[in-house]
Image: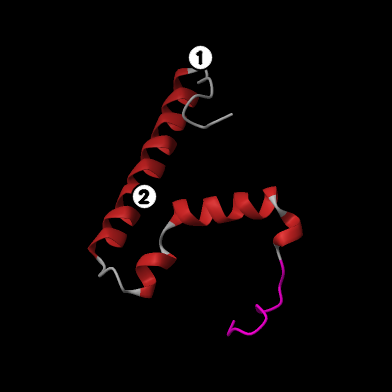
Amino acid sequence: MSALVSPLSRNPRSRIVRLVQLLVERQRLAALEELRERLPLDDPDRHALDTAADARFAQMACDHPEACTCEPPKGGVA
């Protein structure tokens, strides 16, 4: 279940703590995306900061474990 749709506690203190955690996480992700967007398109760090792409590649690896290898591609440079 996503953190954004998970039920919040009825306890006011627990509810506030959870809402602050969610806000901090949103702000962290927004700052990371802003930093990534400011980098030139050809900067390797821009691509290293692309967490959405990382998540997609990780999901592809889980969906297709037979295609995953730690060996460099044949005839190419790793």
In this picture, residue 48 sits left or right of residue 65: left
**Amino acid residing under circle 1:** Arg
Residue 5 percent location from the top left of the image: 49, 24
Task: Please say whether residue 77 is one of the residues in the magenta stretch.
Answer: yes
Q: How is the image coloured?
A: secondary structure
> How much space separates mark 2 and mark 1, taking CA atoms?
26 Å
Which mark is first along the chain, 1 or 2? Answer: 1
- Residue 28's tag is 2
Nearer to me, 19 or 37: 37
What's under tag 2, amino acid-wise? Arg
Q: Position of residue 65 (x, y in %)?
A: 74, 56
Label 2 Cα neighbours within 10 Å, binned few <14 / some 14-19 / many ≥20: few
Q: Quadrant of residue 67?
A: bottom right
Residue under label 1: 10
Horizontally, residue 5 falls left or right of residue 37, namely right
Q: Position of residue 26 (x, y in %)?
A: 37, 41
- Classify 77 as above or below 27: below
Q: Disc count in the image? A: 2
Q: Are marks 2 and 1 in contact (CB under 8 Å)?
A: no
Boundaries of the magenta span:
69-78
Q: Residues within 10 Å of mark 1 (few under 14, many from 20)?
A: few
Is 55 rendered above or below residue 49?
above
